[in-house]
Amino acid sequence: MSESVSKLRLVFADDELPAREKLTHQLSLMDNIDVVGIATNGKEAISLINELKPDVALLDIQMPEINGLELVDILNHQPLIIYTTAYDQFAVQAFEHASIDYLLKPFPIARLKKALAKAQEQILQQMAVVRANDEPSKIQYGLGENKLNKLISKSGERIFLLSPSDIKFIKSEQGNSLAHDGVTLHHLSDTLDQLEHNLSAQNFVRIHRSYLVNIDHIKEIQRWFNGKLMVIMNDGEKSELSTSRAGADKLKQLLKI
């Protein structure tokens, strides 16, 4: 997105022509949207997203060969995801795949605008975090670049300061970031993208769009299907977290396995 964040660069994918035509019309009425690519299936969507690197991808869930849920784990470039579908039973899966919103067809333009406004706000927050981390004042207080010494979790009137080293993993669930310390799930205000950036110096690695893990708390790694890995944490529940294929490659390279 440009520094002025005046326009969101967007790619959308839908295998049905009437749906593409309707969405094209709706988006054409929005001055803050720049449609840079339109895909008719999952394979086209992967190619366009990796090549054009949009801010947001609007993905139909049910598409031939590679559906909207599957293709997200294959992407090299990771935009913000908004899913569209005519079937509400996919809602839970959509949020498990760390989408920022879920649109049930047929959706009015007002609902579409609300979802895209959410995306724009999230990008603005990410840009603010990046700018804050670049401020010289951070170094004066012992906070090196990409170094986050405490995580903030708020619950009512209480504010908890969490040490990153105590956190086993952080997951994104229904648009919320939840840090697991082995006993309790702590709600964090930052997105998983922001946390990935800020915790890169604290041995955290993004293994999936929905999971950021502390490698110091990995107990075991098992080979999984389709080139993925199953990561087992050292918490009391022995939490099992599946990687994406890209996450598996990243983890294998990092651990030299």
Image (tube, rainbow, N blue to C red):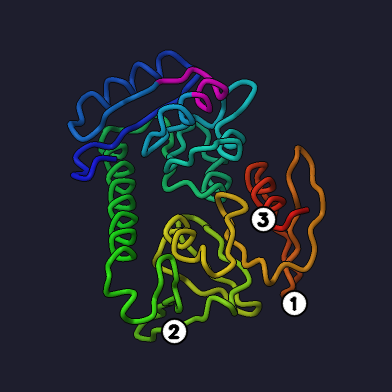
Among the two numbered marks 2 and 3 on one chain, the one whose residue lies closer to the N terminus:
2
Residue 185 included in the magenta stretch of the image: no
Question: In the rendering, at what x and y percent does residue 117 appear?
Answer: 27, 45
Please name which of the two marks, 1 or 3, marks the residue nearer to the observer. Answer: 3
Among the two numbered marks 1 and 3 on one chain, the one whose residue lies closer to the N terminus:
1
**Residue at the spot of label 2:** 160
Q: Quadrant of residue 245?
A: top right
In the image, what residue occupies the spot 31% across and 63% down? 134
Question: In the rendering, at what x and y percent does residue 250 appear?
Answer: 64, 49
Q: Quadrant of residue 133?
A: bottom left
Disc 2 element: strand
Question: In the rendering, at what x and y percent does residue 229 appear?
Answer: 75, 50
Which residue is at the front of the view, 216 or 30? 216
Among the two numbered marks 1 and 2 on one chain, the one whose residue lies closer to the N terminus:
2
State how far apart marks 1 and 2 are (Cα): 22 Å
Work out which residue is located at the far bottom of the displayed protein and give it. Answer: 158
**Residue at the spot of label 3:** 254
Residue 44 included in the magenta stretch of the image: yes
The residue type indicated by label 2 comes to Phe
Labelled disc at residue 223: none
Q: Are marks 1 and 3 in contact (CB under 8 Å)?
A: no
State how far apart marks 1 and 3 are (Cα): 25 Å
The residue type indicated by label 3 comes to Leu
Q: Main secondary structure of the magenta part?
A: helix
Is 33 drawn above or below residue 207 in the view shown?
Answer: above
**Residue at the spot of label 1:** 236
In the image, what residue occupies the spot 38% across and 80% down? 142
Question: In the rendering, at what x and y percent does residue 179 appear?
Answer: 54, 70
Mark 2, Cα crowd under 10 Å, few <14 / some 14-19 / many 20+, is: few
**Segment colored magenta:** 38-47
State how far apart marks 2 and 3 are (Cα): 31 Å
The residue type indicated by label 1 comes to Gly
